């Protein structure tokens, strides 16, 4: 294994670790628990779950490797704050979308050839990317992994 | 910039991004806010701040690049749950330790030569590392960055 592939593999492993722990946590939380805010006046568990699905579902599109499957989640769970828009999905439906999305993203990031991680992502122009080669696909993966951890820290508060 | 250094630089940038945002958040939170639990019955802001300082203060030692400066924090903020041990530090003292620790870790990770990131960390034996070269210093950095994000998601709930 050359040094470059070790580092990229570490980033992929980190995503998978966070994703696996998050799924375990979600499976421990009842539908009723997910209806509660993580702290008084803050987002509900359901909103955070929908938010994470919507953000992760958009990863193939941002990486230039596919389309979003659930664009209808974006308005309710990304653009709008919790409670402002009726959810297009129930909690049991969100659980199915969660499993499908994380299975799909896991396969996608594991199948991407090493060098392709260093290509630009689709929100960058070629010119911007030539100026800053750090804005590549792998930066998206690292950023999304940290965003995932951030919200899982909150969701964890719903465990009694 | 060769591909390997791009990937390592991304991991360092990610730590710095999380660290900078965390410090901004801490500066927005009053001492009184930090005395409150992030959700009913959960850890206080003060405990999370002490926990992050203790874990990050131990990073040089785990990386094999120095010693902990505040080992007295470990019992109160890592080994024991919140409220079981009297804190050896006040919130204003913790703020100073936070700034010193994150300044020190930032300098340390920026000064480490590229290839040194791929060496084993001190909790691994040589034999274990030969079997699994993924257990290197960079894996510690990625893991700690995600742990940082996890708790910052919780601390963020104290903002009104």
Image (tube, coloured by chain):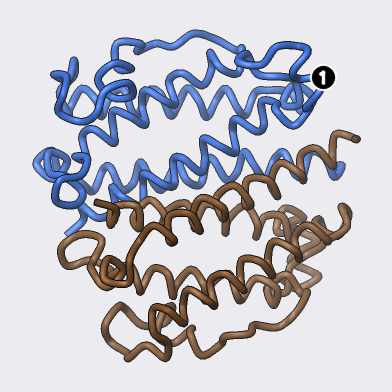
Chain colours: A brown, B blue
Residue at the image point whose x is 74% and y is 32% from the top: B134
Q: Is residue B151 left or right of residue B65?
A: left
- Whole-percent x and y of residue A98? 53, 71
Q: Residue furthest top?
A: B67
Residue at the image point whose x is 19% and y is 52% from the top: B39
Where is mark 1, residue-wise? B130
- In the displayed structure, would residue A120 be above or below residue A47? above
Q: Chain of mark 1?
A: B
In the depicted view, which residue is nearer to us: B12 or A83?
A83
Residue at the image point whose x is 32% and y is 91% from the top: A86
Residue at the image point whose x is 81% and y is 70% from the top: A126
Q: Is residue B105 left or right of residue A102?
A: left
In the depicted view, which residue is nearer to us: A35 or A119?
A35
- In the displayed structure, would residue B47 be above or below residue A97? above
Marks counted in the figure total 1
- Whole-percent x and y of residue A146? 52, 52
């Amino acid at each position: 294994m050359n040094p470059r592939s070790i580092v990229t593999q570490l980033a992929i492993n980190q995503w998978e670790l966070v994703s696996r722990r998050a799924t375990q946590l979600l499976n421990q939380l009842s539908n009723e628990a997910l209806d509660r805010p993580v702290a008084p006046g803050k987002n509900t568990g359901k909103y955070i779950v929908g938010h994470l699905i919507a953000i992760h579902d958009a990863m193939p599109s941002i990486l230039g490797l596919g389309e979003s499957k659930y664009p209808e989640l974006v308005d309710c769970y990304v653009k709008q704050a919790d409670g402002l828009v009726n959810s297009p999905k129930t909690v049991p439906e969100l659980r199915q979308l969660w499993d499908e999305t994380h299975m799909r993203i896991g396969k996608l990031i594991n199948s991407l050839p090493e060098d392709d991680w260093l290509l630009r992502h689709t929100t960058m122009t070629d010119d911007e990317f030539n100026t800053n080669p750090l804005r590549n696909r792998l930066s998206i993966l690292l950023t999304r992994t940290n965003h995932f951890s951030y919200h899982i820290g909150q969701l964890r508060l719903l465990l009694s």
